Amino acid sequence: MQRRKFVKKGVLISLSTLLGAEIVYGKNLPMGYELLGLQDPDPFKMFDKDSQMVVLNDKPWNIEAQAHLLDDKITPNRYMFIRNNGIIPSNTSVDDWTLSFDGESVYEKKTFSLKDLKSKFKQYTYQLTLECGGNGRSEFDPPAKGNQWTVGAVSCAEWTGIRLRDVLEDVGIKSDAVYIGYHAVDTHLSGDPKKEPISRGVPISKALQDETLLAFKMNGEEIPLAHGYPLRLIAGGWPASASGKWLKGISVRNKVHDGTKMTGTAYRVPCEPVAPGEKVADENMCIIESMPVKSLITYPKSGAVINEGKSLKIRGHAWAGELSAEKVEYSIDFGSSWKECSLETPANRLAWQHFSADLRFPKKGYYEVWARATDSNGVAQPMVLPGWNPKGYLNNACHRIAIKVS
């Protein structure tokens, strides 16, 4: 008689995390059994998200915040967007978790246990801005394919981990290294174990920055499963797709990494401006690196009503990829005139910056408040949708909210 197989402890922990409760008789759970509680899941309970978050897709899970939910200076899990490409792994036991380094530009393959990484290398904590390259895609015309993000696919959490640079120095990389690519344990939507849902990376210069981390904590606690537990690459200021979740491998390449979603139109934009709807050859597409300058009004919520004669305090965040925001301005007359906001310095490089201003309106009526950030190179956000591209990336048009004075 064939011996009955049961799920391992690490799998039980992951499944309990997804369900939001202990599986009381989990030790009796046979391998391959699909729990009823996960067949019609409530994503807000499953991922510990606020019910005002917006689900864009469940195969894979993609969930965004609304602007007013992002008012915290450090984004808590309940308001953090989820962008997945495959199926969230169920077996993420830390007991036997390892990270391997290979590729053309290492002298020999080297593998670390998670315990080794945490104990051998110095730990650092940074606030780091992560934004989906397609944030704002819903505004493009003609429409671009993909999740129709509005403004909420951005966050700035506090990440704790070790510098990728320190580990690469320990591994030993060759002088011809030009790129790193990551590999993870999420499953392709087809279920084919030979296919990677996504395997992107960054140039070696980005990999060696102080703030590029192998992270195992988010906001002082273990990273939530949906955000990469137990180990995630964090490369702030670049499209969040460069920050691979559920990290199991790093390939050090002597060429631009050619993993899944590194080629064609994936996370690429035309190297030169094109007309809306125009087809662009792959060789004329450039990889997205540093994200453009952008700002977001997080208070008040769009549609707010105030009494005539009362002032209105607005606040929000600004960020600029590898750069910083030099100033943030607001307009209440559809961009005809602008006034400067108070702008805080970032907590550290690659963290977003907080702005605020006190507004007064001349009379009763309908108004729109627009926000415009300018980066440290003097480049300002466009007031309207920037240049069209086939996948609807890098929309950094001014954010605006509606206000009624009664």
Image: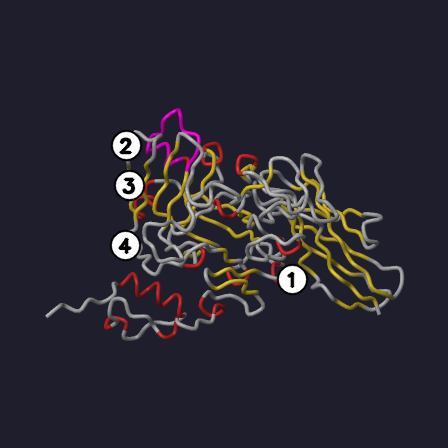
The local secondary structure at tag 3 comes to: strand
Identify the residue position indicated by label 4 in the image: 95
Foreground: disc 4 or disc 2: 2
Identify the mark at residue 269; answer none if there is no mark: none
Q: Which residues are magenta?
A: 166-180
Q: In the picture provided, is 206 more to the left or to the right than 109?
A: right
Sequence-earlier tag: 4 or 2: 4
Q: Kindly indicate whether the residue at mark 3 contacts the one at mark 2 (C-beta within 8 angstroms).
A: no
> Residue 115: percent from the left, percent from the top?
30, 48
Q: Amino acid at mark 1?
A: His
Query: Can residue 177 be found in the magenta stretch?
Result: yes
Identify the residue position indicated by label 3 in the image: 111
Q: Residue at x 36, y 68 (%)?
A: 16
Q: Quadrant of residue 270?
A: top right
Quarter that holds the C terminus: bottom right
The local secondary structure at tag 1 comes to: helix
Sequence-earlier tag: 1 or 4: 1
> Residue 118: percent from the left, percent from the top?
35, 46
The local secondary structure at tag 2 comes to: loop
Identify the mark at residue 108; answer none if there is no mark: 2
Identify the residue position indicated by label 1 in the image: 68
Q: Residue at x 55, y 70 (%)?
A: 51
Rendered position, 91 above or below 350? below
Sequence-earlier tag: 1 or 2: 1
Crowding at dot 3, Cα within 10 Å, few <14 / some 14-19 / many 20+, comes out as some
Instruction: Looking at this view, name the residue that lies furthest to the left.
Output: 1
